[in-house]
Amino acid sequence: MKMAMPPSTARRGQRRDLDILIGGGGVVGAATAVLLARQSATCGLTVGLVEPRPPLMPVPGSAWDLRVFALSRASQHVLQAAGVWPVVSSRAHAYQGMRVWDASDTADSPRALAFSAAEAGESDLGHMTEVATLQAALYAAALQAGVRLFTAPVTGLEISADHARITLADGEQLRAGLVVAAEGRDSPIRGLAGIEASVHDYQQSGLVAFLQSEQSHQEIAWQRFLPTGPLGLLPVADRRLSVVWTLPSDTAAQMLAMDEAAFNAAITTASDGVLGALRLDSARVAVPLRRVTAKHYGVARVALVGDAAHAVHPLAGQGANLGLLDAAALVQVVAEALARGEDPGDAGPVGRYARWRRAEAAPLTLGVHGLQWLFGSSLGPVVAARRTGLGWVGSSAWLRRQFITHALGLAGEVPRLALTGQRD
Ligand SMILES: Cc1cc2nc3c(=O)[nH]c(=O)nc-3n(C[C@H](O)[C@H](O)[C@H](O)COP(=O)(O)OP(=O)(O)OC[C@H]3O[C@@H](n4cnc5c(N)ncnc54)[C@H](O)[C@@H]3O)c2cc1C
């Protein structure tokens, strides 16, 4: 249903420069801006986006950037609603299956967990996407949709009854009815708003690179759980894989320093040779891993989205997927608030958003944290439990269905946009 365009509160002459100001134009912040600017219920609002490092669109035909996300069906829908999926999918690769197994077992063991899109009646289970393309497409769409862009980082925040005032590093001050914190796991806005966050340093790093495999990956996302951390091998092209290898940080540093032949041997061994010999096909980088959980996902005038609210271990590839659901949920709550005649930055709407997304994200982030402990343990009973557990999930039709629904991002209370991919 097409709703009447709401009058911008900024234009109504309140002491505001913008209705909504988003700090951080990573994937989640930029998606929030584009969705707000494109939905008929919210497109009358004045929206600003602060991003100190505006992304550049990769040159067609160039090699993929190392940063790659496994995006779920729900995320695909959000990006469709944002109008960027045609560009994003031009540098994406669909995967058809998943196979997860424990290092104490083999990949073809009946206790390995294996799922396919076909058994769920889906065309695929998700897409490997290049983050650089995703960010640049969202940034371009924000510009095209009339979002005001700022490039000096956020340095200050003051909250008052009817607006929040953001200060940028160049001294500019902007008053907005709602400020959205989307500057990632070290979010300055979260701290300035007085929202506490718990931080867990895994003492691990995620080593990221592209590999060539001797054997076909069969369009399957492979994941082997080793005591040192999981090894994910994700298909991006014929016999080409994006690897996310979780390792203790000192081991990761050694893997970066190794010559290519030694690295190829080490990663082939870590994969148990499941795809034959693996060969490095890019640079290698390692990202230190921390779990960050905000105590609240918002207070009056400030809402947290993406890693600013919840940075999770990458073993389940859920961080950006969760963040895109935050973006869709926040836009839905803002639209509903406007329809009720509420100010979207008031404690009521922000509280509704914060409770909704916390209820959805907290069990998942805790679950991922627990999995990383469970699979990192070499205690005999724990090893037995996880082997049995994987087999048990695999043999129950109901659990299989639950697992696939989660993998597609369609479990729980899903925002409308993420269900349909349609603009309101
Ligand atoms: C190795 C690895 C693999 C991963 N794989 C996956 C995957 O397969 N699937 C998945 O869903 N997730 C994955 N993730 C998680 C994913 O990277 C994050 O969840 C996601 O990037 C969070 O997006 P964001 O926009 O919230 O934050 P960020 O990507 O951190 O973006 C924050 C933005 O804020 C800007 N910023 C910073 N400071 C300021 C400031 N002061 N003022 C204004 N702007 C500022 C930054 O320039 C940046 O652009 C992975 C993570 C790692 C480490």
Image: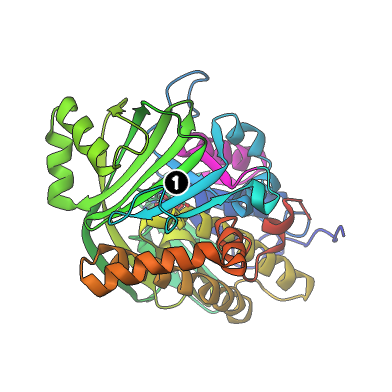
Q: Is residue 389 above or below residue 80?
A: below
Q: Residue at x 57, y 67 (%)?
A: 396
In this view, the residue in front, 239 or 318, is 239
Chain part drawn in magenta: 124-149
Q: Position of residue 145 (x, y in %)?
A: 67, 42
Q: In this view, does 312 lie above or below 109?
A: below
Q: Residue furthest top?
A: 61
On screen, residue 158 versus residue 249, left or right, reads right
On screen, residue 157 versus residue 273, left or right, reads right
On screen, residue 222 versus residue 412, left or right, reads left
Colour scheme used in the picture? rainbow
Q: Where is residue 405 in the image (x, y as percent from the top left)?
A: 61, 61
| In the image, the residue with mark 1 has its CB under 8 Å from the nearest atom of ligand 1 | yes
Q: In which quarter of the image is residue 378?
A: bottom left
Can residue 192 be seen here? The reply is no
- Which residue is denoted by mark 1 in the rendering? 51
Q: Position of residue 13 (x, y in %)?
A: 68, 64
